[in-house]
Image (cartoon, rainbow, N blue to C red):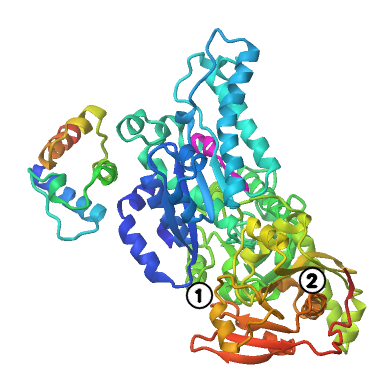
């Protein structure tokens, strides 16, 4: 929704929130429901009200728990039963410098100040540890913003007695904890308050009148920034940029002005602005963002522009370059298809409002930010948080490489007459193993972001993934795939529950339908695969491994389930391909499939060399 | 701006904030007259009024304001 996209009019959103909420709820049906506990050290009412809008706009429908006023610590430490039974999917701790209970005094010596720092830190630390032990869910914690006055003036940040110094040191302890703990995220209100303007942010009226840690007008910005972390945690980040060229990546029109006359580089102020923007875009690549070109140009001219000696971005920085005279919406859809991602995971960056409008209308869900004038491009893209980083994984840094390798494979595929020959030529090496510590984070990430090749679309937190791994009633498998062009990393996940247990799951009804309630059944609660390894026979290798695991446990029957969503149509008949028989299909399209393991099971994968 | 014009704009703000097109405020309207007007919505209402008229209430005014009539008086005094 336009009103909620950065740069937005916060005051309008505050005023019209009820109307906006209604429109968001009417606008779509396929929301991902998440239970979010907001534990406040100050008032949270309007933060929650705004957060709901920004999450709905991301396709997440939140159910909230709000602690009583300033009870964040007590709720956790004394097991508030309401919070326990709420069973949050995510906990947000909204504290601010108003929750710091003691600062150094001017008489304190260094050891005393260190002790005080530890005391303030431990107050939070014990709470985080309790949450980790009790709730196994992602945690988002505010850092501290600066106070609105400085007793020591400019020495406030220098002297250990200064509050700014104390807050910097305390924040650093928070960051240290965040670096060492997965699923723990800092919400950087220190940066946000600076960007907003600390004087306005910390307007004391809002604290003394309403016990708000910031002014009302800053709440939309705050909640937007927070929603960005939440949607990233739940796998709703965008994946790539679809970039226009003329007057977006450089000044001028390359086809008319000629590459030599483009404004790019250090010669002119405008050229510098575009060079800085190109630098920013290029750096996105290193955090795993896919760069693509979507330009109305002759391809030859586009490449000439990208080869400009003063340009920072070069043709090889892009995984796909579409420079033609087709509608940009068509180019965008094709780009998505070629990368095996959904069109709504691309961000369309174009200086021309008319082009943005067309893409907005033709490609539902694609983001088309109002990027403003060239000197504003970076800020708008940056604050929008399309690619909010939660952790920098090896995979993220290598993503561009992987997609480029895919393009290479495609070329090679065309050179082979026989598909199996082609697959063999790839020299594929698979590793298929039960879940293990090294890959838990990646597995959780996959369950949250795989939409297309995903049979049940169940989303799990890392805590849940770890619990499956430790539970004997579950058979878990993850698969990695490498080939001569590169390593694709972890690409497939299967979770199966043994059928003898009477635990309450969504599948109980299905068990009754098929009559399989004995101890020799495996229910496939999740089967997903990353689309970047489609048609590589990895699914057969996974099947082989699951069958082997079943045999070791004396399981003779496997039941598969398909739950239709707006996005997973491609796997509707997946289990049939795997050799299952359909048992049942409901009016809503849910289907149940059965595979009886034969005495002599022949491995279905014959092209990937699999290691256990 | 006349007092009538202030009330006209206030009506719009109240309707937006409480999402109710039926609301018409007068000098003697108070929080008791509008069901959803509780202490939490009050903050949002004041922020919306400030934005509409391009002015700010100070803390003393927020604390002492008794009804919409007094709110209008403060607005008129500030925007002249």
Chain letter of the residue beneath label 1 in the structure image: A
Q: Which residues are magenta?
A: A184-194
Pick whichever of labels 1 and 2 is earlier in the sequence: 1
Residue drawn at 23 percent across, 46 percent down: B38
Residue A460 at x, y percent in the picture: 61, 62
Residue B32 falls inside the magenta stretch: no
Quadrant of image for the C terminus of chain A: bottom right
Residue situated in front as seen by the camera: A476 or A374: A476
Work out whether B50 lies above or below A89: above
Quadrant showing the N terminus of chain A: bottom left
Q: Residue at x 59, y 36 (%)?
A: A126
Secondary structure beneath dot 2 equals: helix
Give A295 or A505, whichever is nearer the viewer.
A505
Label 1: state its secondary structure. Answer: helix
Residue A12 percent location from the top left of the image: 34, 51
The answer to which image quadrant residue A350 occupies is bottom right
Which residue matches tag 2?
A406
Are the two marked residues, 1 and 2, in contact with CB atoms closer than 8 angstroms? no
- Is B54 above or below relative to A348? above
Q: Depth check: A251 or A110 in front?
A: A110
What residue would you read off at disc 1?
Answer: A362
Q: Does residue A523 appear in this view?
A: yes
Judging from the image, mark 2 belongs to the subunit labelled A
Residue A61 x/y as whole percent: 45, 62
Residue most extreme to the top:
A107
């Amino acid at each position: 929704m336009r009103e909620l996209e950065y740069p937005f009019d916060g005051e309008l959103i505050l005023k019209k929130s009820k109307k906006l909420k209604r429109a968001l709820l009417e606008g779509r049906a396929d929301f991902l429901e998440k239970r979010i506990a907001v534990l406040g050290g100050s008032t949270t009412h309007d933060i929650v009200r705004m957060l709901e809008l920004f999450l709905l706009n991301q396709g997440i429908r939140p159910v909230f728990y709000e602690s009583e006023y300033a009870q964040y610590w007590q709720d956790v430490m004394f097991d508030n039963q309401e919070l326990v039974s709420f069973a949050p999917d995510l906990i947000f701790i909204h504290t601010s410098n108003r929750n710091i209970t003691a600062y150094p005094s001017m008489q304190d010596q260094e050891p005393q100040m260190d002790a005080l720092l530890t005391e303030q830190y431990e107050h939070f630390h014990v709470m985080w540890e309790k949450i980790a032990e009790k709730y196994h869910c992602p945690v988002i914690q505010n850092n501290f913003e600066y106070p609105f006055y400085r007793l020591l003036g400019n020495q406030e940040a220098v002297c250990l007695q200064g509050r700014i110094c104390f807050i910097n040191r305390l924040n650093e302890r928070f960051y240290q904890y965040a670096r060492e703990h997965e699923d723990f995220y800092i919400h950087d209100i220190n940066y946000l308050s600076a960007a907003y303007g600390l004087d306005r942010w910390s307007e004391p009226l809002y604290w003394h009148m309403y016990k708000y840690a910031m002014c009302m007008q800053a709440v939309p910005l705050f909640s937007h920034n927070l929603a960005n972390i939440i949607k990233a945690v739940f796998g709703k980040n965008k994946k790539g940029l679809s970039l226009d060229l003329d007057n977006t990546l450089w000044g001028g029109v390359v086809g008319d002005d000629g590459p030599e006359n483009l404004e790019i580089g250090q010669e002119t102020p405008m050229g510098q602005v575009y060079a800085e923007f190109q630098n920013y875009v290029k750096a996105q690549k290193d955090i795993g963002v896919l760069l693509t070109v979507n330009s109305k140009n002759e391809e030859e001219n586009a490449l000439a522009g990208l080869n400009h000696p003063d340009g920072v971005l070069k043709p090889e920085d892009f995984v796909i370059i579409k420079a033609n005279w087709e509608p940009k919406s068509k180019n965008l859809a094709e780009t998505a298809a070629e990368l095996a991602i959904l069109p709504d995971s691309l961000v369309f960056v174009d200086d021309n409002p008319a082009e943005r409008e067309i893409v907005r209308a033709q490609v539902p869900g694609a983001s088309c930010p109002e990027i403003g004038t060239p000197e504003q491009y970076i800020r708008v893209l940056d604050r929008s948080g399309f690619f909010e980083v939660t952790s920098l994984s090896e995979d993220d840094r290598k993503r561009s490489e992987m997609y480029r390798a895919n393009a290479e494979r495609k070329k090679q595929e065309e050179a082979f007459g026989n598909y199996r020959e082609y697959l063999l030529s790839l020299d594929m090496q698979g590793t298929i193993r039960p879940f293990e510590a090294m890959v838990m984070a990646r597995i959780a990430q996959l369950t949250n972001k795989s939409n297309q090749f995903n049979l049940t679309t169940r989303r799990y937190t890392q805590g849940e993934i770890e619990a499956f791994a430790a539970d004997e009633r579950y058979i878990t498998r993850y698969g990695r795939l490498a080939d001569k062009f590169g390593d694709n990393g972890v690409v497939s996940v299967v979770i199966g529950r043994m059928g003898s247990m009477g635990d309450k799951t969504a599948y109980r009804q299905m068990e009754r339908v098929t009559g399989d309630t004995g101890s020799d059944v495996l229910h496939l609660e999740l089967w997903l695969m990353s689309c970047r390894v489609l048609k590589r026979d990895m699914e057969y290798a996974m099947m082989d491994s699951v069958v082997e695991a079943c045999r070791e446990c004396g399981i003779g029957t496997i039941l598969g389930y398909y739950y239709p969503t707006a996005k997973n149509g491609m796997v509707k008949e997946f289990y049939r391909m795997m050799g299952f028989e359909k048992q049942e299909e409901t009016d809503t399209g849910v289907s149940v499939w059965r595979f009886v393991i034969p005495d002599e099971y022949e491995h279905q994968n014959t092209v990937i060399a699999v290691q256990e | 701006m006349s007092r009538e014009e202030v009330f006209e704009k206030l009506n719009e703000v109240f309707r937006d904030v409480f999402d109710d097109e039926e609301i018409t405020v007068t000098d003697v309207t108070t929080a008791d007259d509008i069901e959803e007007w509780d202490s939490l919505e009050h903050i949002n209402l004041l922020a919306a009024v400030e934005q509409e008229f391009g002015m700010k209430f100070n803390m003393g005014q927020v604390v002492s304001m008794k009804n919409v009539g007094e709110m209008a008086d403060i607005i008129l005094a500030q925007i002249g």
